Image (tube, helix red, strand yellow):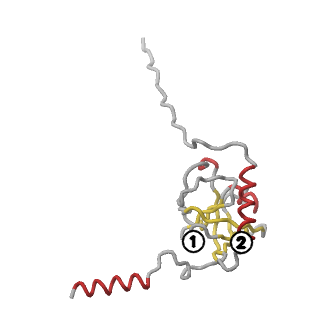
Amino acid sequence: MISSILKIAILFFVLHLQIFDVSGFDKRQTGNATFYSNRFWGVKTANGDDYNPYLFTAAHRYFPFGSWVEVTFLKTNKSIIVRVNDRGPYRRGAIIDLSLAAAKKIGLVPFGFSKVSIRLIPEIEITDSLRSAWVIRDSTNASLHPFIAKKVFKKKKKRVRKKSRVK
């Protein structure tokens, strides 16, 4: 009896529960956006890539890795297409974290934290030519900077307090 109930429960979860299905979520959202600082340069993102501030990438809480998102900054009405490669943002009120290049392109940097509209681009709209154009754009933008970050976080030296001599 228990095994048949367990089989039915497993079948129910397998057939009706899809973890990475974004059909139940809003494909359009409006909320605040932030951007990564340079101190995360070279740190691994959630999908295993190294963060590069000169690539057009973003962090979103539940959109699948590798999906493309159109971000429109509502104050300037500029938009940019970024690729999701990280999870976050983990601060209250923010719906997306942009890379520094994407934030500069739409004019978000002087504001720091401002209202944007995002739209998940379905796979039907993405053609091979668009995908290759975005990859070329990212690679040329990333190659503009001559430095490669090897170590982001350096160990701080401990300060040794000198003993004061009391006479």
Q: Which of label 2 and label 1 is nearer to you?
A: 2
- Left or right: residue 160 compared with residue 57: left
Secondary element type, mark 2: helix
- Left or right: residue 13 compared with residue 61: left
Residue 66 x %, y %:
60, 67
Compared to 104, does 25 lie above or below? below
Using the image as rendered, state which of residue 47 and residue 97 is in the foreground: 47
Compared to 160, does 165 lie above or below? above
Q: How many marks?
A: 2
Compared to 78, does 49 lie above or below? above
Number of the label disc, if any, that sits on residue 63: 1
Task: Give amino acid for label 2.
Answer: Asp
Compared to 34, does 167 lie above or below? above
The residue that mark 2 highlights is 128
Tag 2: Cα neighbours inside 10 Å, few (<14), some, or many (≥20)?
A: few
- Left or right: residue 53 compared with residue 18: right
Tag 1: Cα neighbours inside 10 Å, few (<14), some, or many (≥20)?
A: many
Secondary element type, mark 1: loop
Q: CA distance from mark 2 to mark 1?
A: 21 Å
Residue 111 x %, y %:
71, 58
Which quarter of the image is occupied by the N terminus? bottom left
Judged from this view, the residue extending furthest toward the front is: 128
Q: Name which quarter of the figure residue 134 lies in.
A: bottom right
Residue 100 x %, y %:
69, 55
What's the residue at 55%, 42% (across, down)? 153
What's the residue at 54%, 60% (across, down)? 47
